[in-house]
Image (cartoon, helix red, strand yellow):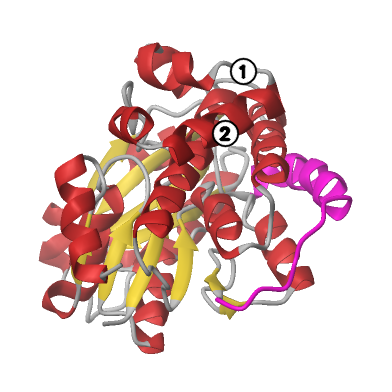
């Protein structure tokens, strides 16, 4: 059996996440202690007793998710012979993947994502950026739609950018950019525009399937407005030690399996203002031979995305309870 190891990103957090691991396993408690000592945050209190609002603050969410994923990964590795063929993490989850494969230490990853969360927040004043999920368009159509919006709105003095931010799964793509341009597009993207923007083979009738869902986010992640945050992270990560590893990380920025220390560093810096190419990452892991995917951390968002990308060709496993952990360890063998 070939396993792929996946690490979730922002949006997967919830109060009480991995409490069952903390209560059952010493290695999980030690991981929480290591994280709390590194950042001077009581992670036990934040993750188990914190409110949704506290956990949703980007500067808290990012280190909490990396910690929770690392604790899950360490417990699984301590209980079984888990040797995935490749690792991948969604957005901030990529840092947990780097820790799991040995490219980064947990303290370095936590310090980096704490700063990453702050830098992303500082890059764009609150209210100036926006994100929305787009349902019913292909990846190419989303790119064309954003280009149309930027070009047409510019004539009315509306500033760019509007860009694809997450290619999550077929039919679910997230766009990100300037709030004023997002509002302009939501108002102006009509059936007539749809037929005019897309090539004739794009069925005009299917405009009725196109839906935009504005997302509650504090900043426009994974678009060029994040360039100041990328510059901050370049300065920090250039000083951070990365190691070349044996098992590849399929990275968001290139969707390619990577083992080299310098390339891993460069790609994790670049992903801040570039789209998360998740569909391609999962397809790449399948090409490497992965047929079973385990989501190491909180929730099962990635389980759902993998099913939509690969359908019946893949089996997915979440890790949200002792029962789910036991099911996976029995498959893996000790």
Q: Quadrant of residue 34?
A: top right
Residue 199 position within the rendered picture, expressed as x and y whole percent measured from the top left: 31, 77
Residue 56 position within the rendered picture, expressed as x and y whole percent measured from the top left: 44, 22
Specify whether residue 122 is in view.
Answer: yes
Q: What residue sits 37% from the left and 52% below the top?
A: 296
- Magenta range: 224-247
Of the 4 image quadrants, the one containing the N terminus is bottom left
Q: Quadrant of residue 283?
A: bottom left
Crowd around label 2: few <14 · some 14–19 · many ≥20 (10 Å): many
For label 1, the SS is loop
**Compared to 93, does 287 lie above or below?**
below
Query: 247 or 238, which lies in front?
Result: 247
Q: Are marks 1 and 2 in contact (CB under 8 Å)?
A: yes
Q: How many marks?
A: 2
Q: What residue sits 69% from the left and 55% below the top?
A: 104
Residue 65 position within the rendered picture, expressed as x and y whole percent measured from the top left: 47, 37
Q: Which mark is residue 41?
A: 1
Relative side of 31 to 215, left or right: right
According to the picture, the residue beneath numbered tag 2 turns out to be 63
Specify whether residue 178 is in view.
Answer: no
Residue 178 falls within the magenta-colored stretch: no
Query: 261 or 9, which lies in front?
Result: 261
């Amino acid at each position: 059996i070939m396993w792929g190891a996946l690490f979730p990103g922002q949006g997967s957090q919830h109060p009480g996440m991995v409490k069952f691991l903390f209560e059952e396993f010493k290695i999980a408690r030690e991981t929480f202690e290591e994280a709390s000592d590194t950042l001077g945050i009581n992670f036990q209190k934040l993750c188990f007793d914190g409110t949704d609002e506290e956990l949703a603050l980007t500067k808290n969410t990012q280190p909490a998710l990396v910690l929770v994923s690392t604790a899950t990964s360490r417990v699984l590795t301590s209980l079984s012979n888990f040797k995935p063929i490749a690792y991948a993490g969604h957005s901030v989850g990529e840092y947990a993947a780097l820790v799991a494969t040995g490219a980064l230490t947990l303290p370095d990853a936590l310090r980096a994502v704490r700063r990453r969360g702050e830098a992303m927040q500082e890059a764009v004043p609150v209210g100036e950026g926006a994100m929305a999920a787009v349902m019913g368009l292909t990846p190419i159509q989303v790119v064309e739609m954003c280009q149309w919006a930027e070009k047409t709105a510019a004539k009315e003095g509306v500033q760019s950018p509007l860009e694809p931010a997450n290619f999550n799964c077929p039919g679910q793509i997230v766009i990100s950019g300037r709030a004023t341009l997002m509002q302009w597009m939501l108002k102006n993207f009509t059936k007539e525009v749809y037929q005019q923007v897309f090539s004739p083979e794009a069925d005009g009738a299917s405009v009725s399937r196109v839906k935009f869902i504005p997302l509650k986010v504090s900043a426009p992640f994974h678009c060029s407005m994040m360039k100041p945050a990328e510059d901050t992270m370049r300065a920090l990560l250039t000083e951070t030690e990365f190691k070349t590893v044996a098992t590849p990380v399929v990275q968001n920025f290139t969707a390619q399996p990577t083992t080299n220390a310098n390339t891993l560093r460069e790609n994790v810096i670049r992903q801040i203002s570039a789209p998360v190419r998740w569909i391609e990452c999962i397809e790449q892991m399948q090409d490497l031979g992965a047929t079973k995917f385990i989501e190491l951390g909180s929730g099962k968002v990635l389980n759902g995305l993998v099913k939509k990308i690969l359908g019946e060709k893949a089996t997915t496993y979440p890790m949200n309870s002792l029962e789910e952990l036991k099911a996976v360890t029995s498959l893996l063998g000790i």
